Image (cartoon, grey):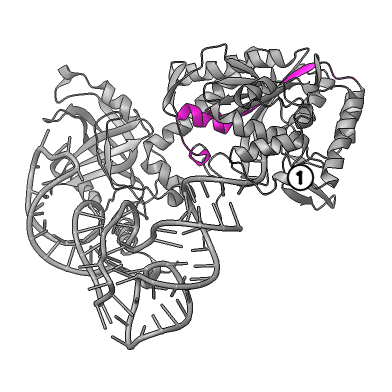
Amino acid sequence: MSEEERSFVEAARREKRAALEAAGVPAFAYRFERSHRAADAVEAYQDDMGENGPEVAVAGRIAELRSHGKTTFLKLEDGSGRIQIYLRRDQLGDAYDVLTHLDLDDHVGVAGRLFRTRTGEVTVRAGSLTLLSKSLRPLPRGKTQDGGADGSVTYGGLSDPEVRYRQRYADLAVHREVRAVFQLRARAIGWIRRYLDDLGFLEVETPVLQPLYGGAAARPFTTHHNALDMPLYLRIADELYLKRLLVGGLERVYEIGHDFRNEGMDRTHNPEFTMLEAYQAYGDYHDMMALVEGLVSGVIQECLGTLRIERYGTTLDFTPPFARIQFIEGVRERCGLDLRTATDEEMRALLRSRGNAGEDLATLTGGRLQDEVFKTVLEPHLVQPTFVLDYPKPLSPLAKEHRDDPALTERFELFVGARELANAFSELNDPDDQRRRFEDQVRQRAAGNEETQPHDMDYIRALEYGMPPAGGVGIGIDRLIMLIADQPSIRDVILFPAMRPEG
RNA sequence: GGGGGCGUAGCUCAGCUGGUAGAGCAAGGGACUUUUAAUCCCUAGGUCGUGGGUUCGAGCCCCACCGCCCUCACCA
């Protein structure tokens, strides 16, 4: 960018940088020995200390700057919060001149004693001031009325969602509540890891680049390996690799990582997202329900300190056990239709009567119609945490047939706020059955269903060695974080959400 | 992909039936030795998303394109 194209604001900052460097003041220092974080420094002051509080050294961005001539107040913001700095020409001498070349957003270090101003704010009386990094581009910050820990009010400021997502660094820099979302996210994921570790699960890493994709119904991203001169797919699920590990004798495994699905984007879908999958040998989907109840209720208690939270205009209660409802029974209670015996035409008629007038209804058959009926009549009502059990077989090519009903599978999904949060089943481990299901998937693909799974021969080979009976579960971590952090869009819980390139 | 909305100063926004662009904050200069959305005086800052068109004249009307948001479709 040429000098002419830069804004006048940036030009002024560059001139200050030049003036500082001409005076021998580096614009970008190497390090600063910090004694306290801002919030800790404020805590370190006791009222009986008067004007002679402890000596502290703090560092941060200049978030507020008020110059009164021979004195200046500024506020430093660091990871812990803000602390006020009081600077006087008669105490700083020539160093006070540096101040005239500082701007909002510069990083500085300050050393001095703590005192309380006559308006009651714990403040550092600066004995020294060190420029640590010059900010050459002003942050899009508003004007903040600092009301303490979380009571601050910002006037103006960055609100354009496009800029917030594209320039997340600026969004984070000016919004401590955005930083808090990602701190909460890390805390939640950390707790989930400990929960699984304590239950004897082994955290593993399986390939992101796969010669065949599988484990879910989705279109993949495709790439190419030059040395091998072959196509590779970014994984859409971890499932088939994790179950190979069960064959290998790793009895409890889990992975938290990114899956990639080449599909639409909206407030609950990002093309890459974080998935937790866990598999437990010698268990079934009932064990997975207990695992999910413990995990979801535990992480909510950990992060929010309660199991009853206000969301979607109501109170959600995560106290186990969660509600349970049969897929077939649930649909029948809502609309009277028995999916076990309903014909395709009956299902289409019901869907049309419920206003679901997708013009491709006529092309849907069997399982996909059943799924559509479920989504139309039952799913919108699943606001409280609810397990939906025993899905029809055609919907679940990797799930074990139900022990009491060959038309169903032993599968459940957990819904919260009418949104799917987890998906689990008793894992299909009969290689011959699995082979037939793959072949059926291939037939569906030939018939035009693009979201079927390819036939994975190596996976069949693994099953032939004998996979123990097992329960498995997948949990969409981003959606779980949306629920915990009370964020309406997946983009608010992903640091750098997918965006079109800037024009 | 369909429908709707939006795009104006660094940020947040105004801008009338079409007459050549405004405010607050931020910025620059000045005053001010306990301020806190500091205050006071002065100043500067814009190819109005991009490209066409209509018009004597377009931020405003028309067309196309780009980007974002909402919604529907798609999507375990």
* Residue at the image point whose x is 46% and y is 34% from the top: A487
Q: Position of residue A287 (x, y in %)?
A: 69, 13
Q: Position of residue A119 (x, y in %)?
A: 12, 31
Q: Is residue A400 visible?
A: no
The foreground one among A497 and A326 is A326
The foreground one among A201 and B67 is B67
Left or right of A81 on screen, residue A383: right
Q: Position of residue B28 (x, y in %)?
A: 22, 61
The foreground one among A84 and A295 is A295
Q: Is residue B64 above or below residue A223?
A: below
Determine which residue is flagged by label 1: A233
Q: Which residues are magenta?
A: A466-492
- Residue A418 quadrant: top right
- Residue A148 quadrant: top left
Where the N terminus of chain A falls, by quadrant? bottom left
Q: Is residue A313 visible?
A: yes
Asked if the stretch drawn in magenta spans residue A175, the answer is no
